[in-house]
Image (cartoon, helix red, strand yellow):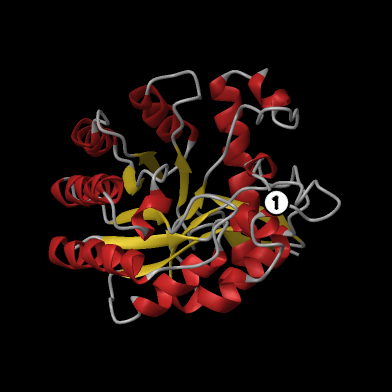
Amino acid sequence: MDRPPCKRKPVLIQQWERIDMWKAKLCLGTDREFGASIEEQIRLFHKVGFEGFFTEWYPEADITGWKNLAGQIGIDYQSVHAPFGRAAALWERSSVAEEALEEQLRCLRDCADNVVPIMVAHAIIGFDRHTPTNEGLENYKRIADAAGRLGVKIALENTEGEEYLAALLEGLKDYACVGFCWDAGHELCYNHGQDMLALYGDRLFCTHLNDNLGIRDYSGQITWRDDLHLLPFDGVADWANIADRLNRHGYTDYLTFELCKTSKPDRRENDPYAAMTLEAYVTEAYKRACRVAALTVRG
């Protein structure tokens, strides 16, 4: 049997079946713990093969500089992750809530000013909160109103406190600019393996893909130390199932990976990554990302 003609970037040939990995672009999150400047990371991601990146927002974040660099070298600035350390305060009426709200609005304005299309946000932080409030919904409506005016999408991520995500996606269902960021790793640990795409896949804006070992505590108590952000295929996630669910919901946008090179306190699972150079680690991340992309194409 003759082999099929070779086109640009065919990635996996099995029984002469060609799988072209053009269905989704590959994106990687920067991390201030990677041991290199954000500029160095962006250049490295592009060199290795990623088509996009995202960054965190913090007061001194150089969103404009990073956007300019992205334009110069030809890589996409996929999203900005909003600060979430005071997300719980947004469900209150207090001076801290106003400060937290202003942080979200500043992040939105930076996205708009630099044409970064998506701001990823958490609905809550903390494992002991389970009661959404009207004050919180009103605060998030103010954020959604601003996002609509500025032309930025808000992607709410599944974390702990599923009640808060549910309240926001229901309460803000009339806002076309508000949708869902699916974190596959959070689903395993924070959401006890519940199929979050079955709940919110019709509003899927973007992904945060990573692996972990589920919930370590035998009684089922969840903790932030379970959120390992391992490379794909280094944990217990079913990546064929992840790809199948993305396909089922017709998702063809960026496959965005959010990964950690260092271990959480009292954990050792990420230690092998810490021993790698950043270039070796990012290259390995790209190889794993290609394997995930091939699954979505095959599906």
In the picture as drawn, the residue positioned furthest to the right comes out as 218
Position of residue 26 relative to residue 130, above or below, is above
> Which residue is found at the position 76% from the left and 46% from the top?
235
> Which residue is found at the position 37% from the left and 39% from the top?
55
Q: Which residue is mark 1?
A: 222
> Which residue is found at the position 53% from the left and 69% from the top?
163
**Front one among 236 and 48:** 236
The location of residue 233, given as percent across then percent down, is 73, 47
Left or right position of 19 against 113: right
Left or right position of 81 against 177: right
Q: Amino acid at mark 1?
A: Ile
**Front one among 248 and 57:** 57
Position of residue 144 relative to residue 285, above or below, is below
> Which residue is found at the position 25% from the left and 66% from the top?
144
The location of residue 2, given as percent across then percent down, is 70, 62
Quadrant in the picture for the N terminus: bottom right
Left or right position of 2 against 279: right
Q: Residue 245 is drawn in which quadrant?
A: bottom right
In terms of secondary structure, where does tag 1 sit?
A: loop
Say if residue 4 shows up in the picture. no
Say if residue 132 shows up in the picture. yes
**Front one among 4 and 24:** 24
The location of residue 279, given as percent across then percent down, is 54, 23
